[in-house]
Image: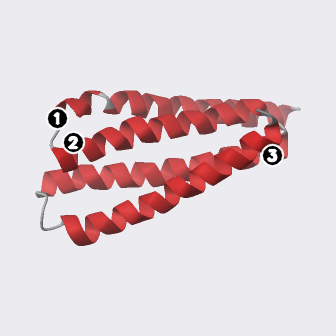
Amino acid sequence: MDLDTSSRWLVLVGCICAGLGVAAGAFGAHMLKDLLDQPMLAVYDTATRYQMYHAFGMVLSGFAVRIGRDAGAAKAGWLFLAGILLFSGSLYGVSLLGVRWLGAVTPIGGALFIIGWCVLAWRAWRWAAS
């Protein structure tokens, strides 16, 4: 995938993830407060917050690809998407479906978030140093 296409996809998918995060947060605040107990509501809230943070990270990565002409920054964005799917997705499953074993997947998503931020920081460092 060329840089312009990669940049556009990251911004688009990041915006979609952010929009879905807002919808999920509103759903949790208005529909789930009477359905879930407080600990599971907190799990759900964590899922929505991290989805939003990393949706913004995807958009940032897309712009970094565009501005820095750097395919390496795209890797960070795709790591954020994978992290959203695994981290937030597993927490949604735990809180909404009661599928407790999905909690074992959550740290993998968290690790992908951390790696994504490290990759983006490395690309920014390289860009600043050039």
Q: For the C terminus, which image quadrant?
A: top right
Q: Disc 1 designates what residue?
A: 100
Q: Disc 3 designates what residue?
A: 66
Q: Is residue 14 left or right of residue 74?
A: left
Binning the other alpha carbons within 10 Å of mark 2 as few (below 14), some (14 to 19) or many (20 upward) gives: some
Q: Disc 2 designates what residue?
A: 94
Residue at image position (32%, 50%) is: 46
Q: Mark 3 and mark 1: span between their CA atoms?
A: 40 Å
Q: Which amino acid does label 3 sit on?
A: Arg
User: Regarding mark 3 in the picture, which secondary structure is present there?
Assistant: helix
Q: Mark 3 and mark 2: span between their CA atoms?
A: 37 Å
- Number of residue marks: 3
> Residue pushed farthest right?
130
In the image, is residue 33 above or below residue 126? below
User: Regarding mark 2 in the picture, which secondary structure is present there?
Assistant: helix
Residue at image position (59%, 35%) is: 78
